[in-house]
């Protein structure tokens, strides 16, 4: 699937690695499939031979016991030790390259807060990264244990309350990589997804510039009315929109400073477009049951103005 607004392909599978970390894990997976598949086949053949083969003359006890020692102890020990060493080296390798653009990801029920501490950027449910350069993600949680899994870019790492974990990876090509919470964390766990958008470095620099500049002053009356509705309806209790006019720094719900440019709404629940956004605002529970956004009552005009205003925040 290609996302038209960015012209990038959406990659979701661990069998389609888009970076060195995912490629190493994919290689390990192939080794495990072939070696363990081979062992399974040998065991099945021996089982069939043992069950249906012709009864043979009783062989010497020494040969039987060597078969048991060799096939039952030495053979599995060698194979499993081999994989243990392979995995330990691979794990160390994935952690070793611990330098990279620092990004902090905080898990919430059921969305992802994303901060670039050195760049002063805060966003949600999307991580933009430059192609070919490593990023170092610091993982933490505000409530329960979550787990970040980006099958086509990296492995999986838990987000634990009161503890920091790290994950380093890089993307080899531009693309959109699907991430998913991989630790059951409550009702909307299945819809706690995020996207990692890997851009060529010059486009990533443009993205940073767009995020760092103050949002434009609102000239159009419709958008101004939407902004007023955002305050009057109490959206600021939970959401932040960073502007010249300081708003609250609420972090109960995702930062909405650039909501209009997001690919999805509700942490990957539905595509971001005007219709879905209206549907989300008027009945948040319909598109992602269990999420913490309460129902807000408003007039059709307020809904229209609010949606136009939010969609204008690119
Ligand atoms: Cu967060 Cu499952």
Image (cartoon, rainbow, N blue to C red):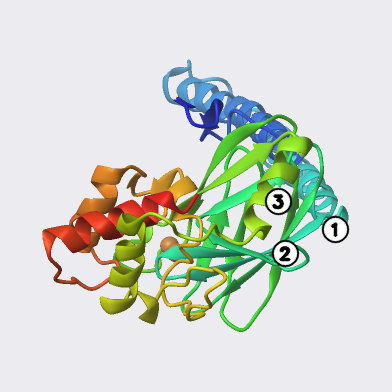
> Which one is earlier in the sequence, the residue at label 2 or at label 3?
2
Question: Marks 2 and 3, how far apart in space?
Answer: 26 Å
Residues at circles 3 and 1 in contact by the CB criterion of under 8 Å:
no
Mark 2, other Cα within 10 Å: few <14 / some 14–19 / many ≥20: some
Residue 28, quarter of picture: top right
Circle 3 residue: 209
Mark 1, other Cα within 10 Å: few <14 / some 14–19 / many ≥20: some
Pick the front one: 307 or 164: 307
Specify whether 274 is left or right of 246: left
Front position among marks 2 and 3: 3
- Quadrant of ligand 1: it is bottom left
Above-or-below relation of 144 to 65 = below
Q: What's the residue at 85%, 58% (across, down)?
A: 98
Q: What's the residue at 84%, 49% (across, down)?
A: 93
Residues at circles 1 and 2 in contact by the CB criterion of under 8 Å:
yes
* Image position, residue 242 (x, y; %): 54, 69
Pick the front one: 30 or 291: 291
> Which one is earlier in the sequence, the residue at label 3 or at label 1?
1
Q: Is residue 288 visible?
A: no
């Amino acid at each position: 699937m290609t996302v038209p607004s960015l012209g990038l392909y959406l990659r979701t599978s661990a069998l389609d690695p888009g970076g060195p970390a995912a490629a190493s894990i994919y290689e390990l997976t192939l080794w495990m499939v072939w070696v363990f598949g081979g062992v399974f086949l040998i065991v099945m053949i021996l089982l069939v031979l043992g069950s249906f083969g012709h009864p043979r003359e009783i062989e010497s006890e020494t040969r039987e016991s060597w078969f048991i020692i060799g096939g039952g102890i030495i053979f599995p020990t060698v194979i499993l030790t081999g994989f243990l060493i392979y995995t330990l080296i691979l794990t160390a390798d994935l952690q070793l390259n611990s330098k990279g653009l620092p990004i902090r990801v905080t898990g919430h029920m059921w969305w992802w807060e994303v901060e670039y501490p050195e760049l002063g950027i805060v966003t949600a449910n999307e991580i933009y990264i430059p192609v070919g350069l490593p990023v170092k993600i610091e993982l933490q949680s505000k409530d329960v244990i979550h787990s970040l899994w980006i099958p086509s870019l990296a492995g999986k790492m838990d987000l634990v309350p009161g503890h920091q974990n790290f994950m380093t990876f890089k993307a080899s090509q531009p693309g959109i990589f699907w991430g998913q919470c991989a630790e059951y964390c409550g009702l909307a766990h299945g819809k706690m997804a995020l996207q990692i958008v890997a851009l060529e470095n010059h486009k990533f620099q443009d993205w940073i510039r767009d995020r760092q500049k103050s949002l434009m002053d609102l000239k159009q009356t419709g958008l101004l009315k939407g902004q007023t509705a955002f305050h009057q309806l109490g959206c600021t209790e939970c959401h932040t929109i960073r502007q010249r006019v300081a708003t609250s720094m609420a972090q109960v719900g995702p930062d909405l400073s650039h909501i209009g440019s997001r690919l999805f709404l509700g942490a990957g629940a539905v595509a971001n477009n005007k219709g879905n956004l209206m549907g989300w605002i008027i009945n948040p529970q319909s598109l992602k049951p269990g999420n913490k956004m309460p129902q807000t009552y408003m007039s059709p005009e307020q809904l229209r103005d609010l949606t136009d205003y939010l969609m204008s925040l690119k």
